[in-house]
Image (spheres, rainbow, N blue to C red):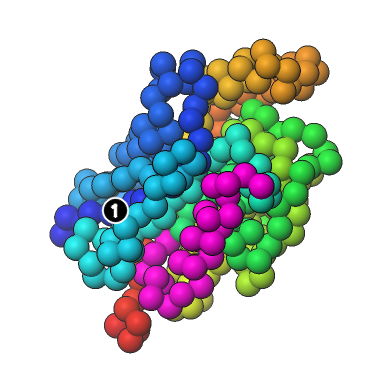
Amino acid sequence: MTKRTIRVALLINDTPVPAVIEEDGTYYDIYKQWLLQSLSTYPDTVVSKNTELVIDGYDVVDKREYPPEDRLLANSKDGYDAIVLTGSKHTAHDSSNPFIPPLISFIRRLTSSPQYLHLKFIGICFGHQILSLALGGECVNGKNGWEIGVYGCELTEEGKKWWTWTGDQAVGEEVNGQGGDDKVYLEQMHRDHVPSIPPSCHLLLSTPQYPVHSFVKYHPYSSPTNPLAQILTVQGHPEFTPEIVSHIIDARHATGVFDEKVTKEARRRAGGKGQGGEGFGRIGWSVWRVLLQHIPSHNGS
């Protein structure tokens, strides 16, 4: 197999709390580690050994950085294969926050223009919400409280096509100690949510508290025999470890964002079944499956 380089533009929407920075670094470091570790355990070892990740970070909050136009175009030198949007403490539907309207406009332009069809988009938590808004959907404040720590997300039939992958769909093996074919387990850190599926998208995951935890928008060249995702999102945090979640809980409890009841439940859930969620397993692998998609050119070749 020919060596392949996947280039990712990471839109960084927040700065971690100090305890997380001390142990795990910035969100650039955290996302890079998540993607590299997920690639190292990717079920297709031939692919994992012959794939290189290049990831560039763009601070869209404080520096208003965005990928240069020439690296967003198809077949450009060092051009990007994907845009990944991180989570954030910020409110995606707060249009008075000066960095949010330009971010939504940027994503809307890229996801709606034929010249960027080669790009894949991955949205994590806040990124999931921003993609919903950019696609004409919604994001609102949740009325059912916080989801913090590990929650089991119910898979729709469509979701099973994207989030249960363990290397050989025909085998259908379950992941030991995790959700198998019915659920996936993910670290959560949110109250804002997407209340309904954006136009032309499909629901993949849900919980009893909040119905839209993941959606996919299929690429125009997608087919039943060759499903291609242009956009894949998840409300949870596959990049978070229990330790990262615990540090955030401590920080938000100390500042009064989380009261005693919320904090107690969050700490109970942070470890999940012992190792957190499935972010570094089949969730990470499924994200890589999208990053590795071969998208046909405009003429279909």
Q: Nearer the viewer, residue 73 or 69?
A: 69
- Which residue is located at x 31 percent, y 68 percent? 73
Q: Is residue 215 left or right of residue 292?
A: right
Whether residue 208 appears in this view of the structure is yes
- Which residue is located at x 35 percent, y 82 percent? 298
Q: Secondary structure at mark 1?
A: strand
- Which residue is located at x 43 percent, y 21 percent? 21
Q: Is 103 a magenta residue?
A: yes
Q: Which residues are magenta?
A: 96-120
Q: Is residue 13 left or right of residue 8?
A: right
**Residue placed furthest toward the left:** 2
Relative to 102, say whether 64 is above or below: above
Quadrant assignment, res 289: bottom left
Q: Is 249 a magenta residue?
A: no
- Residue at image mark 1: 7
Residue 300: image x %, image y %? 34, 84
Quadrant assignment for the N terminus: bottom left
**Residue placed furthest toward the bottom:** 299
